Amino acid sequence: MLRKKITALISILISLCSTAFCSDFFFQLSLCAVKGSCEVHEIEKFYLPENINFLIDRNVIDNGKIIPFLEKLFPEEKGVLEGSGFYIAENDTGEWVEQVLLQIEEEKIAESLSELEDNNKSSLMPPEEDYENLVEKNCLNSNSELFYQEFGSEIFIPKKLSDGKSVVTIVNNDEIKRFFYDQLYRIEKKEFWTNKISPVTRIKTEEYEYDEDSLKPLTLTVSDNAYRKRYYYQEDGIPYELKIYELKDKKYILQSKTRYVYDDEKRLLKEEQINYTYSNMKITDTFVKKHIFKYNFEGIPADEDYYEDDVLKMSTKHSDVKGTYTQHIFFDDKFSVKIFYEDDIKIKEEFNTDGKKRVKEYEKR
């Protein structure tokens, strides 16, 4: 019964498209049904039956390519409706994900039906061995461009946008990822969505900023449902600052700021982190952690001094023999522990309390 109804609808569509005027009018009517706008004045006065609406936004397999159904009727409008519903730039609520998944399933069904007709098979499902042997599947649109690619349980969907930018969607069982590229094919944004819960939820976003035509980002902002991290980069791509914000009352509040200093060989010399304490959304206190690095021997880790609010808390000193070093930990003015290592194995500890020293030695393995 459904097949007869669809056949009848197709016949109606073909008859409507028999003249140039009707053809253009019906195409504009269809365009409005899909995209919400067209060139027909007061389009809301015209009625399009629901069953025809259903057909308008469907895709079919034609000579091994995926094309909108209307391209069968309007070949001169090739590419106009291509990919409708796959990506809406301003829509970040997650509703687009269900449309993507539905569209993919429709393409698979259309392809299966096409194979059935070509091979005169009586079963709706292809033989099981076809799935076992399937490694990669590429589907092209009417412009011979990649429409989507299937590899195992992962589906890859590229999409070109009218402004020269592009977006790539990757769908697997539990996660959906979107990658946004600018006209220079630089990554602008990454979105990570989970498909494990309903509704589909965005769990992380990465956003990149660039200076003119540079291929290296100036900043990277990573946001999730609790925190936001913003990295700042030098021209050579090395990060020199990191700011971490916490989401409170729908606002991101600066929690810490870390600065990095390097030598001419791009080795880290200093790392200083400022942590902020708030009361009534105002900073009331700061706590500073600082690491100072000094490189003495080639191929040997740097010596390191660690401070909290400019008070030395730990000092690590290396010899010219790799794996031989000392680590001095200061708990307060009266108590400290110095640990000795050889071959990265602890061999001795010195406990200093009020000027008194106690030594504990360990057997070498």
Image: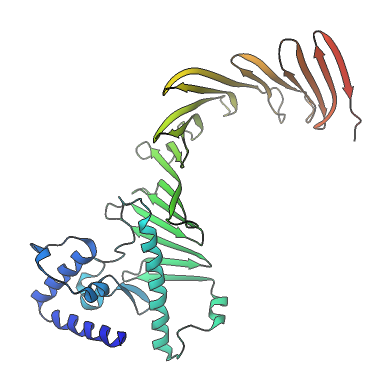
Q: Is residue 232 visible?
A: no
From the viewer's side, name the closer residue of 235 and 208.
208
Q: Is residue 230 left or right of residue 329?
A: left
Q: Quadrant of residue 19?
A: bottom left
* Residue 7 spot, x, y in % from top left: 26, 86
Q: How many marks?
A: 0
**Which percent across, then down, holds residue 90?**
30, 50
Instruction: Return the x and y of residue 321 as percentages of the image width and height.
Output: 80, 27
Q: Position of residue 278 (x, y in %)?
A: 46, 22
Residue 95 sits above or below residue 227 on the image:
below
Is residue 65 shown left or right of residue 267? left
Q: Residue at x 55, y 81 (%)?
A: 128
Which residue extends farthest top? 355
Residue depicted at x 40% and y 77%: 109
Q: Residue at x 60, y 14 (%)?
A: 310
Specify the quadrant that holds the N terminus: bottom left
* Colouring convention used in this rendered image of the protein: rainbow
> Can the viewer see residue 193?
yes
> Relative to 282, does residue 168 appear above or below in the rendering?
below
**Observer-nearest residue: 321 or 42?**
42
Up-down relation of residue 205 to residue 20 (above or below) = above
Q: Tell me where residue 68 sits by quadrant.
A: bottom left
Name the residue rendered at 46%, 88% in the picture.
123
361 vs 240, left or right, is: right
**The C terminus appears in which quarter of the rendering?**
top right
